Image (cartoon, grey):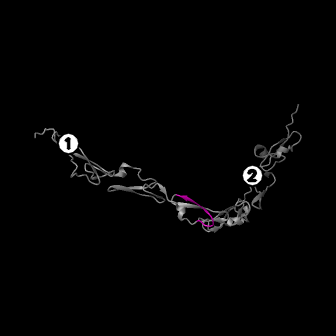
């Protein structure tokens, strides 16, 4: 029998049969042998590559987003696994752990799941991280006009006082007149009031803090065509040469008589 020089890989009288080269193949790690002509190829499973499926595929490099929500990808021989951050689970860290499943909200509180935590929505009259405390603000311990907040650790009331009041219940009046410098200007006398203070001004001054000079000239006190000049704190008559020369002083200046 004469064989054609081109018959390598075939058999039969007419070289019509392809020789199966897969028996004794070297495909590894579950690779499937695919027969060719005088050769074979290895069809590798997803986690291996190379001529004989001997090389591990680094899925962490091929799939940068294989692990979600901050999870860390670790390549293994023939696969990979994700190490999830606190609060997440699942093969790719895509499942939020239900923290309410193990929460201990008290007294009919509603649990709201968060990432790696939970929040207890307390019913009226309860407070605290687990709604396990009585709300001290229910009894209105703070003086009217104050803001009451509840300490989430011990349930005690925290009063935020309006201006002019102090104390744990905001029931103590602050004596603004005794705090230090006189809040009233220009010699005004400070009078403490409940929650505030008033200024009793000296003559010639007005305003909440006696900060404004009274313009006595507004009432036209000068007669017979005299000119009124306002001064700080009042007006004066007759004007001296000094007061006439200063714009800050005031007086009734006599009209100038003209001889014919």
Depth check, front residue: 59 or 53: 53
Query: Is disc 1 surrounded by few (<14), some (14 to 19) or many (20+) residues within 10 Å?
Result: few
Residue 252 falls left or right of residue 64: right
Magenta-drawn stretch contains 112: yes
Image location (x, y in percent) of residue 140: 72, 65
Residue found farthest to the front: 13
How far, Cα to Cα, is label 1 from label 2?
117 Å
Magenta-drawn stretch contains 30: no
Residue found farthest to the top: 260
Q: Do the residues labelled 1 and 2 touch (CB within 8 Å)?
A: no
User: What residue is rendered at 82% in x and 47% in y?
Assistant: 216
Query: Is disc 2 surrounded by few (<14), some (14 to 19) or many (20+) residues within 10 Å?
Result: some
User: Viewer-nearest of labels 1 and 2?
Assistant: 1
Marker disc for residue 211: 2
| Quadrant that contains the C terminus | top right
- Which contiguous range is marked in magenta? 105-114
| Quadrant that contains the N terminus | top left
Marker disc for residue 17: 1
User: What residue is rendered at 53% in x and 65% in y?
Assistant: 102
């Amino acid at each position: 029998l004469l064989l054609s020089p081109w018959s390598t890989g075939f058999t039969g009288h007419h070289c019509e049969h392809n020789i199966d080269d897969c028996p004794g193949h070297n495909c590894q790690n579950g690779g499937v042998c695919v027969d060719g002509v005088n050769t074979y190829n290895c069809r590798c499973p997803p986690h291996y590559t190379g001529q004989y499926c001997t090389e591990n595929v680094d899925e962490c490099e091929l799939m940068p987003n294989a692990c979600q929500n901050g999870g860390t990808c670790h390549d293994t021989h023939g696969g990979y696994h994700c190490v999830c951050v606190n609060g997440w689970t699942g093969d790719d860290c895509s499942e939020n752990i239900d923290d309410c499943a193990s929460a201990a909200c008290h007294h009919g509180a509603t649990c709201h799941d968060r990432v790696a935590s939970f929040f207890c929505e307390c019913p009226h009259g309860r407070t605290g991280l687990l709604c396990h405390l009585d709300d001290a603000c229910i009894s209105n311990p703070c003086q009217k006009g104050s803001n009451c907040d509840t300490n989430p650790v011990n349930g005690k009331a925290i009063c935020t006082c309006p201006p002019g009041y102090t104390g744990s219940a905001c029931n103590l009046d602050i004596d603004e007149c005794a705090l230090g410098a006189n809040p009233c200007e220009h010699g005004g006398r400070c009078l403490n009031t409940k929650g505030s203070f008033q200024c009793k001004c000296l003559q010639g001054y007005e305003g909440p803090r006696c900060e404004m000079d009274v313009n006595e000239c507004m009432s036209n006190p000068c007669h017979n065509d005299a000119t009124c000049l306002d001064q700080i704190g009042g007006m004066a008559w007759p004007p001296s040469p000094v007061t006439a020369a200063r714009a800050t002083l005031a007086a009734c200046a006599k009209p100038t008589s003209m001889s014919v």
